Amino acid sequence: MDFKITETCPEHIYEKQEGVEYGKVELRTYFSTTTNSERKVNVLLPAGYDPAVKYPVIYLQHGIFGDENALLYNENVNMIELIGNMMAEGLMKEAVVVFPSMYVTSDPEMKPAFNPEAVKPYDNFIFDLTADLMPFIRESYSVYDDRDHQAIGGFSLGGRQTMYVGLCRPDLFKYVGAVAPAPGMVPAKDWAMEHPGQMKEEEVTFEGKGFEPEVFLICCGTKDGTVGKFPEEYHKLYEKNGVKHIWYEVPEAEHNFVAIRSFLYNYLQMIF
């Protein structure tokens, strides 16, 4: 892809601008057959959303301990303004943007923590996403349902789950992006815990699956002390396994909004 990465998101992109109409957020509930319960999701509709028009869909995932509000309402990211400004400037296609809760368990008493058992429900996100959430979005909004018009992205643990979904279901998503993806998609050990891995290193491939993303983007801040060098390790694994992808680092960024803004500014221009 002929696209020049901009390492730092321009300030005017995430600041509220006079004369720009921003999108509307709807907090919805849907029934999950995966958990046998009602679950919440935030849906950001483009300004002037028209049910007579078909829109592409973007699914954006939060980090550990987050929920459907965490990424959308991060006061430093300014998600609504950032997306609205990019649409207004024609830098991205108008789209429906979905912010799920990624912790998928049928046990209401279970809570996330830094141990393998408490983190495991995040791995169930792929089942809730594909069996329950995506059908709900298609039924509730005027959106395309083909892979050409579906993108997925995420931050930290949401980045890890995004890569996992992208690798497992390339038939659903043509665009995959992760910022500061957490360790654990393959076996690893970090400062917090030992990760058993969702897949083996040799399974990290699109070979034989019939599909691969048009865009597979990974980035991370150069001063990220939370996930450290694990995003770069994913990059090296993809290179080793012949997985086509784009990798870049955000100068001086930590595990925070600076990296997230940079990721969104680039990724949202590259999709659809």
Image (spheres, rainbow, N blue to C red):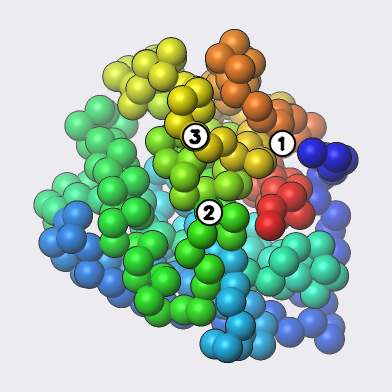
In the picture, the disc for residue 253 is 1
> Where residue 38 sits in the image (x, y, percent)?
21, 69
Q: Amino acid at mark 2?
A: Arg
Q: Name the one closer to the observer, 165 or 100.
A: 165
Q: Quadrant of the C terminus?
A: bottom right
Q: Quadrant of residue 108?
A: bottom left
Q: Amino acid at mark 3?
A: Gly
Few, some or many C-alpha atoms within 10 Å of disc 1 (few <14, some 14-19, many ≥20)? many
Name the residue tied to disc 2: 147
Q: Nearer the viewer, mark 1 or mark 3?
A: 3
CA–CA distance in space, label 1 to label 2 = 32 Å
Q: Quadrant of the N terminus?
A: top right
Q: Is residue 209 visible?
A: yes
In the structure shown, which secondary structural element does the residue marked by tag 3 occupy? loop
Q: Amino acid at mark 1?
A: Ala
Say whether residue 202 is left or right of residue 219.
Answer: left
Q: Residue at x 27, y 66 (%)?
A: 39
